C-alpha cells in the first residue's frame, strides 16, 4: 500500500520512539511524588527531615505505611516538633528497634 524509502522509515521509527519515550515519561511523572514535597530532603545527607515531611514523603521510608505516616504527622501536630529521633518510639506502632533502623534515612533539624 505505502512504500517508504530507507530515510523515511528511519524518520518514522524515530518519531515512534520519541512518542513512546514521551508516554513513558508522562506515565512515571504522574506516579511520582511532586518535587515540592522533597523540600524536606537534605540533599547533602540524602535524609528526610522528620519534622518537615508530610505523609506522602514518609511512606517512602522502609517499614512506614500510610497509617504509620499519618500517626507520625498527628504526633507532631499534637506535641510539636520532634527534638530527637528516639522520640519517634512514642508513636504508636514505632518500636525502638524500628526507629533505630530508620536513623539512616531521617534526621531532625
Image (spheres, rainbow, N blue to C red):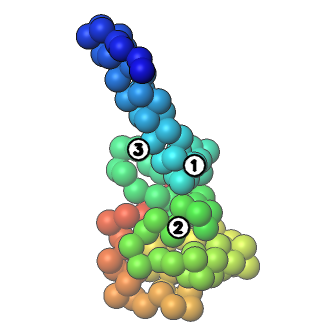
Q: Would residue 39 be visible to someone looking at this image?
A: no
Q: Of marks 3 and 1, which one's residue comes earlier in the chain?
A: 1
The vertical placement of 25 against 109, above or below, is above
Element on which disc 2 rests = helix
* Residue 54: percent from left, percent from top: 62, 63
The vertical placement of 48 against 61, above or below, is above
Left or right of 14? Residue 27 is right
Disc 3 designates what residue?
43
* Residue 14: percent from left, percent from top: 36, 21
- 3D distance between C-alphas at marks 2 and 3: 16 Å
Q: Nearer the viewer, mark 2 or mark 3?
A: 2
Q: Residue furthest right?
A: 78
Dot 2, crowdedness within 10 Å: few (<14), some or many (≥20)?
many
Residue at left 44%, top 48%? 42
Disc 1 designates what residue?
30
Element on which disc 1 rests = helix
Residue 66 sits in which quadrant?
bottom right
In the picture, the quarter occupied by the N terminus is top left
Name the mark on residue 56: none
Q: Nearer the viewer, mark 3 or mark 1?
A: 1
Residue at left 54%, top 54%? 31
Name the mark on residue 58: 2
Q: Would residue 99 be visible to someone looking at this image?
A: yes
Left or right of 2? Residue 92 is right
Q: Of marks 2 and 3, which one's residue comes earlier in the chain?
A: 3
Amino acid at each position: 500500500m505505502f512504500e517508504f524509502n530507507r530515510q523515511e522509515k528511519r524518520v518514522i521509527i524515530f518519531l515512534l520512539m520519541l512518542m513512546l519515550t514521551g508516554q513513558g515519561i508522562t506515565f512515571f511523572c504522574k506516579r511520582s511524588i511532586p518535587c515540592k514535597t522533597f523540600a524536606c530532603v537534605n540533599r547533602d545527607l540524602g535524609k528526610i527531615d522528620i519534622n518537615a515531611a508530610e505523609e506522602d514523603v514518609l511512606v517512602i521510608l522502609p517499614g512506614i505505611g500510610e497509617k504509620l505516616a499519618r500517626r507520625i504527622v498527628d504526633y507532631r501536630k499534637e506535641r510539636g516538633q520532634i527534638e530527637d529521633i528516639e522520640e519517634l518510639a512514642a508513636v504508636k506502632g514505632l518500636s525502638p528497634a524500628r526507629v533505630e533502623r530508620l536513623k539512616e534515612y531521617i534526621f531532625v533539624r
